[in-house]
Amino acid sequence: MPIRVRFAPSPTGYLHVGGARTALFNWLFAKHHGGRFVLRLEDTDRARNRPEYAQAVYDGLRWLQINWDEGPDTGGPYAPYAQSERTALHLAAAHAMLRSGAAYECWCPPAAGADTEALEDASDADAPASVNGGGIERTALRSQTRCLCGLSPRTDKPDSAADGTQPAIRLRVPAERALVVDDAVRGRVTFPAGTVPDFILTASDGRALYNLAASVDDHEMRITHVIRGEEHLANAPKQLLIYEAMGWEPPVFAHLPILLNAQRRKLSKRDGATSLHDYEGMGYLPEAVVNFLALLGWSPGDNKELLTRDEIVRLFDLEGVVKHPAIFETAKLGWMNKEYIKALPAAALATRLADFMRRHSEHGAALPDFPYLERVAELFRERAKTLADIVRLGSYFFTRDPIEPSEEALAKYCSPPGPAGDSLRAVRSALAAAPRFDVGTVEKSIRELAEETKTKASAYIHPLRAAVSGQAVSPGIFEVCSILGRETVLARVDALVSFLDSAASEKTTAAHAKPAR
RNA sequence: GGCCCCAUCGUCUAGAGGCCUAGGACGCCGCCCUCUCAAGGCGGAGACAGGGAUUCGAAUUCCCUUGGGGCUACCA
């Protein structure tokens, strides 16, 4: 039987990193075993689904190059792939279970759901067991595993039936039997008899609920392995029961450890950057993100960290999936991204950079020509952790505006202003006189200047760095100058010289005005 | 509260009874190199949650405790 897995997100407007990892693990599993990867949208969520939300899922997946063999947009042999379009199938299954006696109609008011939060609060506050006028005993409700209808099916139709209200359909959960899930990553998980309540298959408004819909769709789509987050572990016994009631062969379940935030809580949108899109915007490379995500909760067993997509596919299997949750901490992602940037040829990096700047930078509208971009990219290849770093650290390569020297640069390399100005004047004439402006010639000019004046070259280099970049740190100054070109360099040196001159005279004036006491 | 899952350096993890005075990676610290910053080289600090049991021998098996997490909807 061919292996088929699925990624079944509910489209909420963006694809978060946890979902992306689940998708990746499914995709890797499929690729490793030569199976198929199915994308299914679980968009049955009350009114909260919008067509454009699906786009975010597609975009995120495509960015990581997690391609799906079947899906809502591409179609496939088991279409449709949007859960909202499959309700007839879900309902048919529910009625089949009703007919076979596996399920029963429940006329209980759905009020209990509305009380859930109140119950939570009550328990959190250690409040008395009785809540909000309904008189429902907390412990009674919590230990309730079946509704009254289940205990004694009523023959009399309640009044509400007359006005078109339907009953909910509940699955009858065997009370005397422990439920066992053989999980591919956790081993055998047992839910003692009586701990899984009779649960709702279809609501009184006729909608199919999650466990029903997911099971029916997984079965109909011939899914062989359900690989999903651990938060679904408690659903597994329920879904197994549905398979059993329908006489279907159940899939293998595998529950992945969840991703935690720094507070060791389930990673949620409140935890800063959790959307895949955020990482794209921060200038991470998709291949680095894939590598990083693959290693969160999975290990190839040896000590390799930097793995190509093909290597991961070759090595990946469920055996290597770890059981404990992982804290989503991005320091290592930064390192990986840097490694991937370093490994990129300059031209390739420049292409990525141009693309990134067009989408995410103010300089995107007026990009320098490609050869220039390529030289800049080469300079930052070993210095930048992200594409955004290149744009930020190298901003002076992308602007025609005057360079505003940073406080740090001024304090470190241009203080006191008088001598610094003098050094710069010397540098200026040396550079102006240089026969050419390639890296070697620029370096030679400065080094010779230092030799003639019996000074360390750094005495010229640092003020020059401040003038040209405005920063206290930059890539090699000779390279920077050469790329910028003589005209720009001299202009920036002139600008800093006059700035320094006025600073120096201000200082003198100030000294005269306020003589030291 | 109930049910379930989990537990090795700060973080991601290797480890499936002796190879472990516990390995790697990121991060951190120091030194070297050096025009600054990176990169690179060298070195360093840093963990088996606790307690029992099994065994000649336990990070590895079992039990308990503790801690953390998930679920507990007529959401998905």
Image: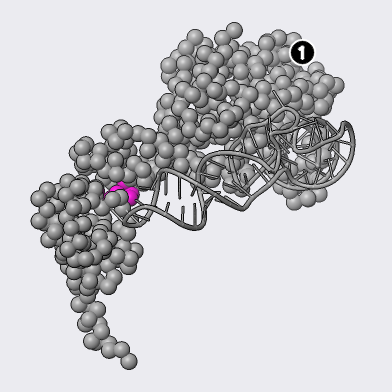
Where, quadrant-wise, is the C terminus of chain A in this rendering? bottom left
Tell me where the magenta segment starts and ends, as one range: A391-397
Above or below, A381 against B32 in this view is above
Where, quadrant-wise, is the N terminus of chain A in this rendering? top right
Tell me where residue A97 sits by quadrant.
top right
> Which of A6 and A136 lies nearest the eye of the viewer?
A6
- A279 sits left or right of A214 in the view: left
Above or below, A126 against B58 in this view is below
- A383 sits left or right of A172 in the view: left
> Which of B7 and A83 lies nearest the eye of the viewer?
B7
Question: Residue at the spot x=26%, y=63% of the render?
Answer: A456
The colour mode here is: one colour
> Which of A78 and B10 lies nearest the eye of the viewer?
B10
Question: Residue at the spot x=46%, y=25% of the render?
Answer: A309
Image coordinates of residue A391 in percent, x first then y, are 31, 46
Q: Main secondary structure of the magenta part?
A: helix
Above or below, A186 against A220 in this view is below
Question: Residue at the spot x=39%, y=42% of the render?
Answer: A386
Q: Chain of mark 1?
A: A
Residue A42 in view, yes or no? no
Image coordinates of residue A140 in percent, x first then y, are 83, 37
Residue bearing the label numbered 1: A101
Q: How many marks?
A: 1
Name which residue type carries label 1: Gly
Image coordinates of residue B2 in percent, x first then y, are 81, 36
Tell me where residue A380 sits by quadrant.
top left
Is A155 covered by the magenta stretch?
A: no
